[in-house]
Amino acid sequence: MSVVDAFGGKVGELAVTDGQKARSLMLLGYVAQEFRLKWFPDKRLPKSKQYLSWLIMRYMRGVLRHPEQSAMTSLFIPCEPLLSVGYAPYSAEGVSAFMTGTRCQDPLLDAADEDPGLCSYHRIFLGGTRLGLLPTPPFLLYTNVACDANMITFPHVSRTYHIPRFCVEVPYEISQDSVRYVADELREMVTFIEDQTHRLIAQDTLRSAVNRSREACSLYLRYLDLVGSVNVPGDVTSQMYEIMTNHMLLGSEESLRYWRMAVSDYEKGKPDHGLKLLWIHTIPFAQMPVRTLLNFNPRVRIVACEMSYESMIAFQDDPDPYLAMAGRMVRSSFCGGVEHRVDQILAVQKRVHADGAVLFGHWGCKATLASSGMIKDELEALGLPCLFLDGDGCDIHNQSDGQTETRLQAFVEMLEAGK
Amino acid sequence: MIRYVCKYTPIELFAGFGVSCKPLEAMASQYPDADRLGHANLCGFGKSVIQAVGDGDAEELVLVNCCDVMRRVADIARKSGKCRFLFLLDLPHEDIACSRSLFVREILRLKDAYTRYSGKEFSVERFLSAFVPEKKASGTYIGLVGARADASLAAFVSQKTGYPVENHTCLGNRFVPRPEGTGDAMWDAYAAALLAQIPCVRMDRNVGRSALYHDPQLAGVVYHAMKFCDFSQMECNEALASCSVPSIRIETDYTTQSEGQLATRLEAFRETLDKTKEPPMKIRDGFVAGIDSGSTSTDVVVMDQNQTIVASVILPTGRGARASGEEALGKALEEAGISRDQVARVVATGYGRDSFGDDQRITEISCHAKGAHFLDPSVRTVIDIGGQDSKAIRLDEAGGVVNFAMNDKCAAGTGRFLEMMARALDMDIDQMARMGDTANEKIVISSMCTVFAESEVVSLVAKNKDVGDIVYALDASVASKIAVLVGRVGLTEPVMLTGGVAKNPGVVHALERKLSVPLAISPYGATVRGHRSGIVRLGEMTGFPPWENFSKTAGKLFSFLPFVIIIRVLVAYGS
């Protein structure tokens, strides 16, 4: 048993009886890990990813230690307004992924077992909140992007813990009308945040944050252009961390700094001829066969991840910061019909030139599961081989290591044979 | 003919075009094409729409983006090319001003789309004449809420509960008043009226739904939680907790395959609703017989008027409920040395209870309640882990059923689950029962699905994990599943554990750990902890053979307490 497993097991065990104590223990572990990442980083990673590991650990420790200075958010809510008032976005999905990385997810899943079919990221968030391992920030921001689980979990938490909430409802149609509609909602959201925090959000401050988002987005697209022909060592955990820089940290100085460093690393990277995978949907970054195959492997690597690019690939700047943020939401890969999602995949593929796509069928995500056949057919018709991989990003009971390993390995062998 | 799936669909709009609409929501026994075109983990309703489209039954279809599944169903339907007209209506999650403006836009977009498709002209007069007055329920009724229930399910609930049913699920309780005004004002009013309906389970604010539970005419609430419908699964506990009338959760996968389990739940619910109990039958002469037609075994007890057991027989149910019941009854009569004519009454319970003519039938839920109360009047919660079903039953001080919950279709958390896991571990159920009381290494095994758990066990065996640790994890998995049921009814001490699995110390201890309460398995309140005296004493009391004499077949293992319960049925109805 690894140190992480033992630590996570202890946190989980303690969470069942005393959530607050478990959180203290967990924070103690995070402080130690933050120190280690700062002074003794993983030397196999480039500078940018070393910084990223430390940044995310620091961020997580911050929101868990000072929940009163944060807001519970859905991953898909634009966070520039929160960052503008010095509040940290406490993303339910991000925190759940982190609990999975901490290996304390089982008791949390157990504590939210009324619907085993619900997305496990949301179940961990709900269970952790119920046990008291996860705090309850003073207010809540959520949206119907990218799935129903948001519209179930967040209202439930709001009702149960009497937390004021604000919902940004994104229309189904991807159009300028929808962007304007969402922009109006975001204006209301800003008023809501001001009311909750008793702080005014200055237009200039918000504009600066959105400018940083735009710049980070440009750098990200530059990274996509480079990643197809250059290899910089990396691991699947960094892919998960990038989801965070592109969501709850988007608009911050730190996110911008990371993408500057990442592009710099890739500009200095060596030409690469290994297999390139475009990963669609969530990444089971803690699952051993995935780590074994995709961490620091010159033979095969992930070049793009849908959860990172979903709102970046179609980003359009606008002088009005509200319209810019709304556009990101409306044009997300997860909005509209399946053809829009496929179009976004193809837009990324044009930049990264992947050899194959892995469509991860995360248990409980009906939106992806139901469209898996259509996406696979479309991509293969366009010449991009696609593996549909059943599993679960967090809940080990919905994973099968043997199956995952066999299917991923076989897909890699198939791609290598066809190269 | 426009097919539609949701009460928020503006069907009056189509009347304006002179076109009729028909709901699309019929359950089927299976959806052969839907798993292939969609995925196994979609709700049954989503699959039914995919199937209907594939079968050519929905050439003109208006869907609503109620949920992730319906959005993807629209994609699949579009891709199939089998819909001449397909429209996905964007339905907001709330009934607030900006949502209404969005919805007006959607209604007009639908109007334009249909005009382009059909070439028909829209008539405001026809549109306005399509609105019908509200139908108000008269008299007491059962409210059917939660996930979509089609007319056949609503009728089944009505038949089994004996009450008229008001279907408040997706297409039920649709009422839209005629909008006032003309032009834009009329469309605004129409959109507002559509959104102002009693909100379905998918709508964000549940205040309107909660109002349903306080209707003075409401006799009880049946909450339908559909497999893979997250909205209903997650809301169910919250909704039932706010009910001031008796309520019950039923679960289906939106196929017609669950009638046996549903019938048991609904009939038991009816028993809790019925305030007027028939007076106990007085038997001066003759005997009474009880038949428990279970999923695994069929048990028969014959008792005389002094409540003395004169015969008892257990047979496997394998050949069919009726045949096994008749054979077991014949053998019991033979053992008692009496003829069929001397039996004044036969009472049947269990899955196969309907196979026994017009004699008295009662669900095993009520049987367990009566039996547990008879054995120990202080008991307030009964947990029964049987062969195919697990139950948690909360009792009042008189032994009446206050609330109960049963497992869903899956055998996880039942004796059958343990039987399958024992087979995966290449041992018999008795061997398994003697293991797993302690663990060296903590392993967690899925409590959700028998098939998943079995594959996990196989993987653990391949990793050379200690069998004792695996059994410990399996016992914990059963306990987790049972704890969910107990959570639904509310844990009230003292708790009695019944069913064959009560004789498995590992499971008993796992349950005690999970629930943090001691479990009584005998009328004397003794727990199983480490010894079986309670079981033996119960055995002595009922004339049932003690543990050591049990056959090693699972069938007999699972038939322990129903046997005691039958005695109580006979006491209740035959004295």
Image (spheres, coloured by chain):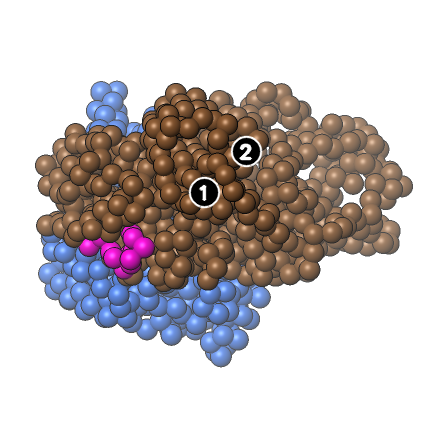
Chain colours: A blue, B brown
- What chain does badge 1 belong to? B
- Whether residue B515 can be seen here: yes
Question: Does the segment drawn in magenta span residue A124?
Answer: no
Query: Residue A207, how many percent across, how many down?
Result: 48, 66
Residue A128's tag is none
Magenta range:
B518-529
Secondary element under disc 1, as helix, strand or loop, is loop
Q: How many marks?
A: 2
Q: Residue at x 38, y 73 (%)?
A: A69
Badge 1 vs badge 2, beta-carbon distance below 8 Å = no
For this rendering, which residue is in front, B285 or A272?
B285
Q: Amino acid at mark 1?
A: Gln
For this rendering, which residue is in front, B518 or B285?
B285
For this rendering, which residue is in front, B227 or B351?
B351
Q: Residues within 10 Å of mark 2 (few under 14, many from 20)?
A: few
Give the labeled residue for mark 1. Answer: B305
Secondary element under disc 2, as helix, strand or loop, is loop
For the residues labelled 1 and 2, the Cα–Cα distance comes to 18 Å
Query: Residue A61, how many percent across, how many down?
Result: 26, 67
- Whether residue A244 can be seen here: no
Q: Residue at x 67, y 49 (%)?
A: B141
Query: Residue B138, how many percent across, how many down?
Result: 76, 50
Q: Which label's residue is closer to the chain start, 1 or 2?
A: 1
Residue B359's tag is 2
In the picture, measured across the screen, residue B89 lies left or right of residue B524, that is right
- What chain does badge 2 belong to? B
Query: Residue B93, how many percent across, how many down?
Result: 59, 53
Q: Amino acid at mark 2?
A: Asp
In the picture, measured across the screen, residue A102 lies left or right of residue A309, that is left
Instruction: Examine the rendered structure and indicate whether residue A162 appears above or below residue B50.
Output: below
